[in-house]
Image (cartoon, coloured by chain):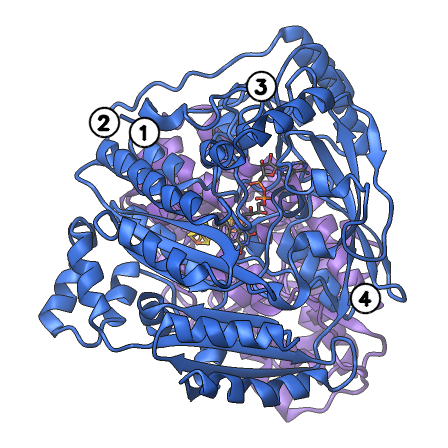
Chain colours: A blue, B purple
């Protein structure tokens, strides 16, 4: 509401001696305590922070933001901060969705975007050496210009950095073909918590025995700062086969997906939408504007007045999630599977063979061939879904996603159990978009609303607690590719059980001062993610 | 024409865009030239809009930091290319600047620029009327001409690069009925608009409209001038009565009627000026008009057309944040160089200057190449 007083923001502070030492090393203009710079780095895309911001609360501003220009300066910052006992939070583009960059114990935001050089592209060995701060889309376009691709297309490619991908073990839309980022990386350079520059061994394939890569990938800035990486690249696809299939239910679709992977087929894109997500995927228009419009347009079976009502008062409708889930559950949509096979990546005719075998595998599981149209529509709009978030939050509602992974045998049960747990709390849908020979991930989307923002934060926490309780008891992973950050730390701690002590031991030996991104992954204070419970109330 | 708008009515008309940006996961940040030049979250479209929204809500006063942050926008409209909501970020930031100015909170660089403008009628504070008199034959300075060429202040800063070849081209094409604007208002008023000085803009627009009253056709070789005279002043209620015509549209029939005397050699890459391509949507027609004058096919950079990066010369940035303007220009120059071209050709005097100072490639105004091709 205009004019409404917002809760005062409390900015933490740093010793003046640290700030002046940083300024001396980095230059005045690369160290800031200006309020606007602090605010801009006070949250990432964790939806709970958005709910709190909507209520006027800025809960975790840093004390300063620094922009080192190269690896040596990164090392200087880490050394100086360590000497002054100041927390250091590595920051890519702040697109993380679980509070990974929240300075929960104050300190410095270490913005890495000035480290954005492409250091080398070895076209013969197809190896790229790149600094961590480069924006995904900028890098991919440069590679395409030179006839290559990284094969890594997270939906956030427009707003995330290579460093963020590595630190969170990100997955792209073509992960079934190219793997997650940890399958693409060949070596890492990093600055450890003592400010020493380190490099892991260049390897020709996945993580090798004894390599520190496995530890650093997914460490979310808690062990050190990644500065550059060598990554495998691919020649551009020359051909693309796109097809969609409609399955009677999720189980049949999952059986077909597992069948493909077990047969050794590697489509670039393999995405199965549940009945509810199929509605949205089908909504057809090439826009991603107002979610109220797309949701109501995606319910063709609803009478016009009901659709008009939905379009007008989405938050109200979302406050009766059980009803909404039931109504949409009655619609005879089936489950859409989008398959894209690319050719010319590594030569040969393997892709042609895949394209020939896939329809038969799907039909065997009861699917009908929906043609190229829906797959082409998905391809053209593959980043569009992210634009819908704004409309939902603007309308007073909220939306979040939860990506968890399990083996094929557990996926259908896990899917149903999470749906059931969330049905009374939020409108929920899911798709299965990262598939491997042994299993895959489920990507739940849930949208909810409450009377006010305080209520929304409480509801938000209840949703996560309910969903993760199911995940933990089903033996699935707490996260597949968004990372753990601050928000899921307490679930990870529960999942690790006694092994958490081991993780803490490791952290203590690699970062004895506990200054590297404290509070993330349940390590080094900050309340293992419990702190936010209660803050919003 | 594009629908990007300035808002004279405060931030109110921008509420939807402000909210959408505030809750957006920064999806257009990768193409924002100030965000890329400065590598800072603070100047991403997302945060500039968040700050404007906080100002609208009364949670932040515009004075100081916010007013300074609102300056970090080139007005290039590139963000809209990647915004599925079609948000008008530069329009909203312009309104935010107007709010700051009204509240007496404009940054010192803006105040200084406005003072220069008041003194000399252009943002540089130079005597550009004298520069025009020196460059244009007296017989062409005809106040009552029905077709008037409005060169714009950027062209008058380097008339030999822009105005002289254009007059030569018009003569070579047999265009005889065009006079050159001779009034003291050498600038279209874009800097006033961009500073958020809407009162000043209206006064300037009224004076221009009066001076241009006899003109049926107003030929604007500078796309920023074409946008301001044709759209901004109309919306501000003080537009000249004549029709504003871009150079490509004006030249089209003459170029069709005549073969060039020669084709200019070399590999040229085209840089899209933001106002030409994203605002006026004349990038394609300009390319087509230019191609006939060239021996080799015009090259494109990896970022071109609606996706072309700004040269750093937009908005008030070259005046108030010259370092940012230089950095943006360097990034764009590198993209153009990567096309393998031997030279850059563009269609805006401001871009010629920015890019000329930024990279190793020679940069030409397209009128220079056309003049060379059609010279008898
Ligand atoms: C709309 C949207 C869509 C998304 N889609 C996907 C998707 O398809 N796949 C996917 O995997 N993720 C997705 N994400 C999540 C997010 O984009 C990824 O986690 C991404 O990898 C974060 O990158 P970033 O540069 O923004 O990192 P940030 O958010 O800045 O940081 C993320 C974490 O990494 C740490 N970090 C960042 N850089 C470094 C470094 N150089 N060294 C050490 N630690 C570092 C930070 O401290 C933090 O803990 C999506 C997010 C959004 C908002
Ligand atoms: S302009 Fe559009 S894409 Fe950019 S931040 Fe705003 S809503 Fe997001
Ligand atoms: S108009 Fe250009 S400079 Fe301004 S916010 Fe948009 S992309 Fe950035």
Nearest to the observer: residue A220 or residue A377: A220
Callout in the foreground (3, 2): 3
Q: Which mark is residue A107?
A: 3
The reply to whether the C-beta atoms of the residues labelled 1 and 2 are less than 8 Å apart is yes
Please name the residue that numbered disc 2 is placed on: A4
Please determine if labels 1 and 4 lie on a single subunit.
Answer: no
Nearest to the observer: residue A390 or residue A492: A492
Callout in the foreground (2, 4): 2
Q: Which mark is residue B343?
A: 4
Structural crowding at the residue carrying mark 4, measured as other residues with C-alpha within 10 Å and reported as few (<14), some (14–19) or many (≥20): some
The reply to whether the C-beta atoms of the residues labelled 3 and 2 are less than 8 Å apart is no
Please determine if labels 2 and 4 lie on a single subunit.
Answer: no
Q: Residue at x 40, y 85 (%)?
A: A366
Q: Which mark is residue A56?
A: 1
Q: Chain of mark 4?
A: B
Please state the horizontal and vertical placement of residue A404, each as a whole percent of the image: 48, 51
Compute the Cα span from label 3 to label 2: 29 Å
Q: How many marks?
A: 4
Q: Would residue B263 appear left or right of B172 to someone viewing this image?
A: right
Q: Chain of mark 1?
A: A
Where A207 falls versus A151 (above or below)? above
Compute the Cα span from label 1 to label 2: 9 Å
């Amino acid at each position: 509401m205009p004019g409404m007083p917002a809760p005062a923001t409390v900015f933490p502070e740093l010793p003046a001696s640290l700030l002046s030492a940083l300024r001396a090393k980095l230059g005045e203009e690369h160290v800031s305590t200006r309020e606007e710079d602090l605010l801009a780095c006070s949250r990432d895309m964790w939806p709970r922070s958005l709910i709190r911001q909507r209520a006027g609360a800025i809960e975790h501003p840093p004390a300063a933001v620094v922009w080192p220009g190269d690896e040596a300066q990164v090392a200087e910052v880490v050394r100086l901060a360590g000497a002054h006992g100041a927390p250091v939070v590595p920051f890519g583009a702040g697109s993380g969705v679980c509070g990974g960059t929240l300075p929960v114990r104050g300190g410095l935001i270490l913005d890495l975007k000035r480290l954005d050089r492409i250091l080398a592209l070895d076209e013969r060995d197809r190896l790229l050496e790149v600094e961590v701060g480069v924006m995904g889309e900028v890098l991919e376009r440069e590679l395409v210009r030179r006839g290559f691709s990284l094969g890594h297309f997270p939906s956030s490619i427009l707003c995330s950095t290579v460093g963020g991908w590595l630190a969170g073990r990100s997955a792209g839309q073509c992960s079934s073909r190219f793997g997650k980022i940890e399958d693409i990386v060949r070596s890492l350079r990093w600055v450890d918590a003592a400010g020493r520059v380190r490099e892991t061994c260049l390897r020709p394939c996945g993580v090798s025995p004894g390599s520190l890569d496995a530890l650093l990938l997914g460490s979310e800035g808690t062990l050190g700062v990644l500065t550059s990486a060598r990554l495998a690249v691919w020649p551009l696809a020359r051909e693309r086969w796109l097809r969609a299939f409609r399955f009677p239910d999720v189980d049949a679709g999952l059986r077909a997906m597992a069948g493909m992977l077990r047969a050794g087929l590697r489509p670039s894109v393999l995405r199965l939408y549940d009945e509810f997500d199929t509605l949205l995927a089908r909504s057809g228009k090439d826009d991603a504007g107002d979610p109220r419009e797309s949701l109501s347009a995606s319910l063709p079976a609803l009478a016009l007045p009901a659709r008009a009502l939905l379009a007008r008062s989405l938050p109200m409708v979302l406050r009766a999630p059980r009803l909404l889930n039931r109504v949409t559950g009655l619609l005879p949509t089936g489950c859409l599977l989008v398959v894209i096979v690319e050719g010319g990546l590594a030569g040969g005719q393997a892709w042609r063979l895949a394209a020939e075998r896939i329809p038969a595998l799907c039909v065997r599981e009861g699917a009908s061939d929906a043609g190229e149209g829906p797959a082409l529509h998905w391809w053209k709009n593959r980043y569009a879904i992210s634009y819908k978030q704004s409309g939902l939050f603007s309308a007073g509602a909220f939306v979040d996603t939860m990506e968890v992974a399990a083996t094929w045998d557990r996926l259908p049960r896990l899917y149903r159990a999470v749906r059931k747990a969330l049905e009374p709390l939020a409108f929920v849908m899911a798709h299965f978009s990262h598939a491997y020979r042994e299993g895959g991930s489920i990507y739940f989307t849930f949208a909810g609303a409450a009377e006010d923002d305080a209520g929304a934060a409480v509801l938000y926490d209840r949703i996560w607690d309910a969903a993760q309780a199911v995940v933990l008891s089903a033996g699935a992973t707490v996260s597949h590719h968004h990372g753990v950050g601050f928000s899921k730390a307490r679930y990870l701690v529960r999942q690790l059980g006694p092994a958490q002590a081991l993780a803490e031991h490791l952290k203590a030996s690699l970062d004895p001062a506990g200054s590297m991104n404290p509070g993330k992954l349940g390590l080094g204070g900050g309340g293992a993610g419990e702190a936010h419970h209660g803050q919003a109330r | 024409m594009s629908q990007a708008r300035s808002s004279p009515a405060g931030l109110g008309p921008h509420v939807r865009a402000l909210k959408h940006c505030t809750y957006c996961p920064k999806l257009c940040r990768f193409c924002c030239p100030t965000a890329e030049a400065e590598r800072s979250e603070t100047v991403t479209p997302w945060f500039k809009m968040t700050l404007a929204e906080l100002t609208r809500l009364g949670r932040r006063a515009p004075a100081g930091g916010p007013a300074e942050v609102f300056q970090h926008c080139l007005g290039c409209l590139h963000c809209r290319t990647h915004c599925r909501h079609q948000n008008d970020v530069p329009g909203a930031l312009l309104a935010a600047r107007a709010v700051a100015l009204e509240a007496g909170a404009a940054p010192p660089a803006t105040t200084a620029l406005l003072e220069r403008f008041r003194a000399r009628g252009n943002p540089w504070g130079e005597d550009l009327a004298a520069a025009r008199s020196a460059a244009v034959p007296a017989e062409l300075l005809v106040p009552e001409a029905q077709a008037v060429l409005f060169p714009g202040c950027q062209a008058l800063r380097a008339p030999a690069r822009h105005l002289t070849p254009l007059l030569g081209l018009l003569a070579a094409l047999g265009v005889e009925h065009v006079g050159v604007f001779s009034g003291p208002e050498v600038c279209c008023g874009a800097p006033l608009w961009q500073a958020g000085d809407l009162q000043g803009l209206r006064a300037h627009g009224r004076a221009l409209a009066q001076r241009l009253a006899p003109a049926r056709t107003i030929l604007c070789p500078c796309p920023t001038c074409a946008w301001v005279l044709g759209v901004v002043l109309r919306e501000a209620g003080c537009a000249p009565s004549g029709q504003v015509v871009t150079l490509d549209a004006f030249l089209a029939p003459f170029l069709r009627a005549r073969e060039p005397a020669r084709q200019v050699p070399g590999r040229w890459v085209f840089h899209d000026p933001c106002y030409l391509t994203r605002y006026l949507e004349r990038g394609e027609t300009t390319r087509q008009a230019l191609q006939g004058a060239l021996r080799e096919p015009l090259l494109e950079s990896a970022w071109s057309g609606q996706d072309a990066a700004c040269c750093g010369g937009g908005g008030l940035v070259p005046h108030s944040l010259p370092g940012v303007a230089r950095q943006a220009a360097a990034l764009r120059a590198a993209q153009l160089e990567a096309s393998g071209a031997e030279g850059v050709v563009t269609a805006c005097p401001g871009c010629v200057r920015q890019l000329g100072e930024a990279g190793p490639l020679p940069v030409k105004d397209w009128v220079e190449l056309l003049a060379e091709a059609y010279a008898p």
